[in-house]
Image (cartoon, rainbow, N blue to C red):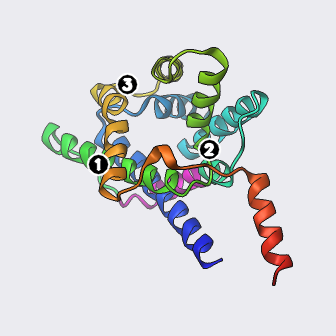
Amino acid sequence: MKKEVLKYIKLISGLFFCAVGIVTILNADLGLSPWDVLNQGLNKQMGITLGQANIGIGLIVILIGLYFKQPLGSGTVLNVMLVGIFIDFLIELNIIPWANGIQNQIILFIIGLIIFSLGSYMYISTGCGCGPRDGLMVVLTKRTGFSVGNIRLALEASAMTAGYFLGGRVGIGTVIFSLITGYIIQFFFKVFKQDIKKIEHRSVIKEFGMLKKFLLNR
């Protein structure tokens, strides 16, 4: 049980780092990730917070994934709920500085990218469920027969385009984020000597079974 508690501490810490990375990239003002461009567009058009937009889009993506029979893990649900809450909390606290000048913008963007990638590694490595967008990417890849790269590109391009027309911030940072984030996440897997291919994400049903077994054996 102690191992499971530590796993969820790592999961939640990873989601917090993701939120820190997102807000840091936002404050660098060089362009957001494709999905955050959409979240910011909804933020501007609907008057909801960036975190609320993140939660709303995440829930829609989960529903689409469930329609295509994508397994739902506790990490998937926590990803949707907590990252949005953490984003709004950090923005409200205003503890992450805004960058002034291109040099500081680049430095802040790089820091945000690294923090976000570390957080992504942390929650993915727990095996408690893919993030909603990654899960949708996987299920659409299986359903359509197209490559992961093509499906990811199509999803991110769609999110970015919709976000742009809604008023989201697209910039050089958006392109850089799309091109290198995956490699930085892979770097952290190598540093911590974990093979991402060997991670098996648990479904909520399996986790309930594990909890039930633990309670009955007490």
Residue 164 appears in the picture as rendered: no
Q: Which of the two discs, 3 and 2, labels the residue nearer the N terminus?
A: 2
Do tag 1 and tag 3 residues touch (Cβ < 8 Å)? no
Label 3 CA crowd tier, 10 Å (few <14, some 14–19, many 20+): many
Residue farthest left in this picture: 103
| Image quarter in which the C terminus is found | bottom right
* Residue type beneath disc 3: Val
Which residue is label 2 attached to? 52
Q: Residue at x 40, y 58 (%)?
A: 94
Question: Residue 60: x percent and y percent?
Answer: 70, 33
Identify which residue, 35 or 168, lies in the foreground.
35
Q: Which residue is mark 3?
A: 170
> Which mark is on residue 211?
none
**Residue beneath label 1, please?**
98
Q: Residue at x 57, y 28 (%)?
A: 137
Label 2 Cα neighbours within 10 Å, binned few <14 / some 14-19 / many ≥20: many
Comparing marks 1 and 2, which lies closer to the viewer?
A: 2
Mark 1 vs mark 3: in front: 3
Instruction: Point out the tag, 1 or 2, that comes first from the N-terminus.
Output: 2
Report if residue 15 is visible in the image: yes
> Is 41 in front, or is 147?
147
Numbered disc 1: secondary structure: loop
Q: Amino acid at mark 1?
A: Trp
